[in-house]
Image (tube, rainbow, N blue to C red):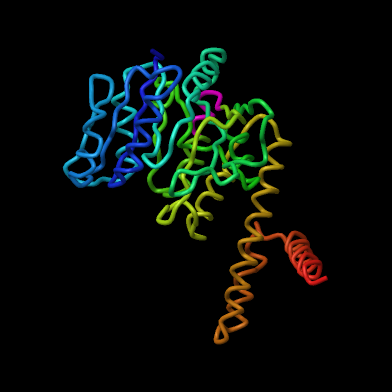
Amino acid sequence: MSEITVCIMSLNRPEYLCEAVASALAQTALPQSIIIFDNGSESSVLDAVNSYLSKDVRWIGSEVTHSAFWNFQRAIAEAETEYVLVMHDDDRLCSDFIDKQVAFLDSNPEVGAVSCNSFLINEQGQRNGRTLRSDFIDAGAELYRCSVDVALRYANDSCIPFSSAVFRTKFVRKVALQEEYGKVADAVFFCDLADTCVVAFQSERLYECRVHPGQDSVSFSPEILNKLENFLWTRNGVNEERINLLRNLLISQHTFRKLLQIFKALKQSNFPLKEVMELCTVRDRRFSYSDALKIIFNFFKNKLAGTT
């Protein structure tokens, strides 16, 4: 068995949870332990997975429902193996997930965490022909050696998938998942982790990520995006060129969000023009007028192209 603990976060989704457990048990390289960390579900959830429970599949429940951050941290604290995976109960592992992710970590001792690309599946568990990341397919592995590298990934409107990441337990315990960042806490976490060890992403699709109604990660408030922007802006490193690239990307993102905010405000007929203009002011040092003109130009260019 592989020196890895598979932790499955569970909350009131018994059908999906059974699929997640089954996918962990169907690995070509079996994990040493599978632990369901239930976050206060109804009793029917335990009943649904009872037939899976054995010496290799354990259930650790909770009398009340806590935050997902609390559940993640207790899973990390419980793992006794060299590697640990914390997956969502609505996702599934491809049969060679553990084999290939653990092999990558074994071959790259400087890497403290490796994520991978994922097939997207619908509510019924069928693949919809898309992948979680389409910008980096069949191109090997990508390494992030500092927080600036990670920040550049997110500033490029991409990500490092969190739920498919296998961690070296000794490294993941050094970094806290910061709850105050809410839905973007994964980006902050990987930045902090990359300042402790190398973080990697494998382009191979070894995971199945379920897309369904009720997910809380499909939209982000302007407030939380601004908070992430402020965090990413503070990332530093030895490569001044990459830091400047990061800040230029953040300025473009900031400008786009501000333009969107202005557009929405203008659609409100009673919204004073003065207040609209205050959304875009010279005091906002991260608003780029040149970027704004490019965004507006490209918008109308694409709009016109769509009408011809």
Residue at 22% from the left image edge and 32% from the top image edge:
60
Q: Is residue 66 left or right of residue 106?
A: left
Q: Is residue 45 left or right of residue 195?
A: left
Question: Does the segment drawn in magenta span residue 144?
Answer: no
In the image, 240 versus 199, the foreground residue is: 199
- Residue 148 rendering spot, x and y as whole percentages: 61, 36
In the image, 76 versus 140, the foreground residue is: 140
Please report the bounds of the magenta region as a residue range: 192-199
- Residue 205 rendering spot, x and y as whole percentages: 57, 32
Residue 279 lies, with reference to residue 159, above or below; the image says below
Residue 223 lies, with reference to residue 93, above or below; the image says below
Image quadrant in which the C terminus is located:
bottom right
Image quadrant in which the N terminus is located:
top left
- Residue 48 rendering spot, x and y as whole percentages: 24, 39
Question: Does the segment drawn in magenta span residue 196?
Answer: yes
Residue at 42% from the left image edge and 27% from the top image edge:
172
Residue at 77% from the left image edge and 67% from the top image edge:
306
Picture quadrant of residue 304: bottom right
Q: Is residue 76 left or right of residue 51?
A: right
Residue at 74% from the left image edge and 66% from the top image edge:
299
- Residue 244 rendering spot, x and y as whole percentages: 71, 42
Q: Is residue 34 left or right of residue 239?
A: left
